[in-house]
Image (spheres, rainbow, N blue to C red):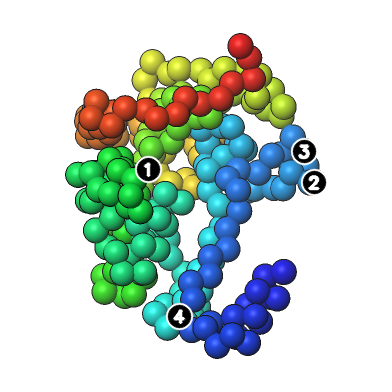
């Protein structure tokens, strides 16, 4: 079907200036293997580990993006709304919505956590605007925080298989730290003999990470939660 779509764009003569994105739902469900997919990363859907969040992403925009590029910048699905609107000519939507604006006769005042990646896509800058990512569970809890190469885990999913949907997360008294460039599979906390010493040498990261999480949570004072997470139990 992807090939049929691309062929149709060619037939219509609009392929060069049409943005085509290809991605997947987050997290493989290893418990339903082989139909549930597979991932080399630790964990799976409904966990705090990278296997529950990372997805492949391919983007095609011949008029603006040079083909064959590979990017290791941090980008989240929430970044696509401001990025696509910027590509369509509105690069101030985030600021307008935060201040309050009227669109098609309806008033909106919301906080978008996404970033506009258009300048990066077009090559105007060699660095994407996102340097952090907040990991949340399906119940809305903040289970981890990433800044740059470093990730801190606050709550850990220790269950496996279908039990990840039954067992609660384990709240850690002290966060775990991972360097996702050095240890992208998050294995060293249980396989690296020098992990404890390494983590002790990087505990200085706790303070800036906590400050950013507090800053994020403070935005809910002006912009309260609009929807509560669902639950399997009453």
- Looking at the picture, how far across and down is residue 168, in whole percent? 57, 17
What's the mark number on residue 27? none
Residue beneath the point at 31% across and 69% down:
89
On the question of residue 111 being in view, the answer is no
Q: Earlier in the sequence, mark 3 or mark 4?
A: 4
What residue does disc 4 label?
17
Q: Residue furthest right?
A: 34
* Rendering quarter of residue 211: top left
What residue does disc 2 label?
34
Q: Earlier in the sequence, mark 1 or mark 2?
A: 2
Q: Are circles 1 and 3 on residues that touch, CB within 8 Å?
A: no
Q: Earlier in the sequence, mark 1 or mark 4?
A: 4
Q: Nearer the viewer, residue 6 or 180?
A: 6
Q: Earlier in the sequence, mark 4 or mark 2?
A: 4
The alpha-carbon separation of the residues under discs 1 and 2 comes to: 29 Å
With 39 as the anchor, is 21 left or right in this view?
A: left
């Amino acid at each position: 079907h992807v090939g049929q779509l691309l062929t149709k764009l060619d037939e219509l003569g609009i392929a060069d200036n049409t943005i085509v994105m290809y991605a997947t739902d987050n997290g493989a469900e290893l418990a339903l293997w082989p139909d549930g997919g597979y991932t080399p990363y630790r964990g799976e859907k409904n966990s705090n580990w990278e296997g529950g969040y990372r997805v492949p992403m391919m983007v095609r925009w011949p008029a603006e993006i040079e083909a064959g590029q590979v990017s290791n910048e941090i980008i989240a699905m929430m970044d696509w709304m401001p990025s696509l609107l910027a590509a369509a000519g509105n690069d101030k939507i985030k600021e307008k919505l935060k201040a309050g604006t009227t669109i098609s006769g309806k008033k909106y005042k919301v906080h978008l956590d996404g970033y506009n990646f258009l300048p990066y896509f077009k090559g105007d800058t060699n660095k994407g605007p996102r340097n952090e990512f907040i990991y949340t569970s399906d119940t809305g809890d903040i289970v981890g925080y990433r800044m740059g190469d470093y990730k801190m885990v606050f709550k850990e999913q220790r269950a496996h298989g279908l039990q990840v949907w039954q067992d609660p997360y384990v709240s850690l008294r002290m966060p775990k730290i991972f360097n996702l460039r050095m240890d992208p599979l998050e294995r060293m906390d249980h396989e690296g003999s020098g992990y404890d010493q390494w983590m002790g040498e990087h505990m200085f990261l706790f303070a800036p990470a906590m400050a950013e999480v507090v800053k994020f949570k403070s935005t809910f004072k002006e912009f309260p939660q609009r929807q509560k997470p669902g639950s399997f139990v009453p």
